[in-house]
């Protein structure tokens, strides 16, 4: 069973191919300027060629549904939908914060992934050491009192955490500066589990999980 995993919710354009839940090919690139529209289809072609797998051999496409960048999510969604329609295979949706949290292995504390939502706002949730959500995903404006009720060791990760480092200063707060963006490298086991459970999206009506309304100026 081959599943194509697409993660475009942040500056990281990331594509992986998994077989029975195990990642066998990965291609990703994070740039300050979003290049998803240029890189995504190229990366998909490259990882399939590297793995000697054809499009017709894919069992499903898994997509990071958000929250995250509006532009990145729209590009990823349109690509995933197009592939699913063309190949007549199911669409699987995963949230980007879970994929980010799984980059941390913790046996003694909580994991708080944060995706930058501009200014002092972040998209975030709290996970335990088994990656179970202990809070709902939310858009949170960070100040000195944020997460003050937590006494356990807590690992903060993501590009949103970097800007909060000087504000969240409790001794039990640990910032992992080398974990910045969600990656499709953590989506393999998640998409495989959803495929086994037949948890598929309606391809025609699926929309990304923006969390906040999109506003545009003149």
Image (tube, helix red, strand yellow):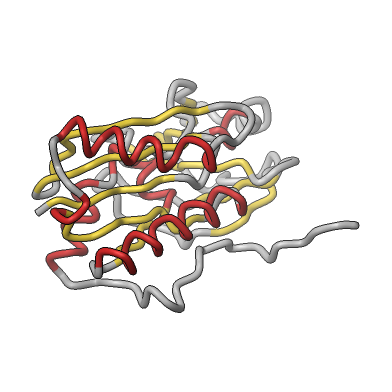
From this view, report whether residue 27 is shown above or below residue 130: above
Q: Position of residue 202 (x, y in %)?
A: 36, 77
- Residue at the extreme top: 178
Placement of the C terminus among the 4 image quadrants: bottom right
Q: Position of residue 112 (x, y in %)?
A: 45, 42
129 sits to left or right of 41? left
Query: Would you identify the image quadrant in which residue 213 lies?
Result: bottom right
**What residue is drawn where x is 52% and y is 40%?**
36
**Quick check: can you spot residue 105?**
no
**What residue is drawn where x is 33% and y is 38%?**
109
Q: Position of residue 110 (x, y in %)?
A: 37, 42
From this view, report whether residue 40 is shown above or below residue 190: above
From this view, report whether residue 161 is shown above or below residue 130: above
102 sits to left or right of 195? right
Placement of the N terminus among the 4 image quadrants: bottom left
**Quick check: can you spot residue 198?**
yes
Query: Would you identify the image quadrant in which residue 135 lies?
Result: bottom left
196 sits to left or right of 208? left
Q: Position of residue 24 (x, y in %)?
A: 16, 35
Viewer-proximal residue among 37 and 69: 37
Viewer-proximal residue among 110 and 102: 102
Viewer-proximal residue among 186 and 136: 186
Label tally:
0
């Amino acid at each position: 069973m081959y599943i194509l995993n697409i993660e475009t919710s942040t500056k990281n354009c990331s594509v992986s191919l998994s077989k029975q839940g195990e990642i066998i090919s990965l291609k990703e690139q994070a740039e300050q300027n979003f290049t998803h529209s240029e890189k995504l289809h190229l990366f998909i072609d490259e990882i399939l060629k590297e793995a000697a797998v054809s499009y017709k051999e894919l069992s499903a496409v898994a997509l990071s549904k958000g929250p995250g960048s509006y532009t990145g999510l729209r590009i990823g969604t349109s690509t995933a939908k197009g592939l699913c329609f063309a190949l007549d295979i199911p669409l699987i949706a995963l949230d980007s914060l879970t994929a980010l949290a799984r980059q941390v292995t913790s046996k003694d504390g909580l994991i708080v992934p944060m995706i930058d939502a501009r200014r002092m706002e972040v998209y975030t949730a709290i996970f335990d050491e088994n990656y179970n959500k202990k809070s709902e995903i939310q858009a949170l404006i960070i100040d000195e009192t944020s997460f003050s009720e937590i006494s356990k060791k807590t690992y903060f990760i993501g590009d949103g955490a970097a800007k909060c480092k000087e504000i969240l200063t409790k001794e039990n707060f640990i910032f992992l500066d080398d974990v910045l963006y969600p990656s499709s490298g953590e989506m393999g086991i998640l998409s495989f589990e959803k495929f086994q459970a037949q948890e598929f999206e309606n391809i025609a009506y699926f929309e990304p999980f923006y969390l906040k309304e999109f506003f545009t100026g003149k």
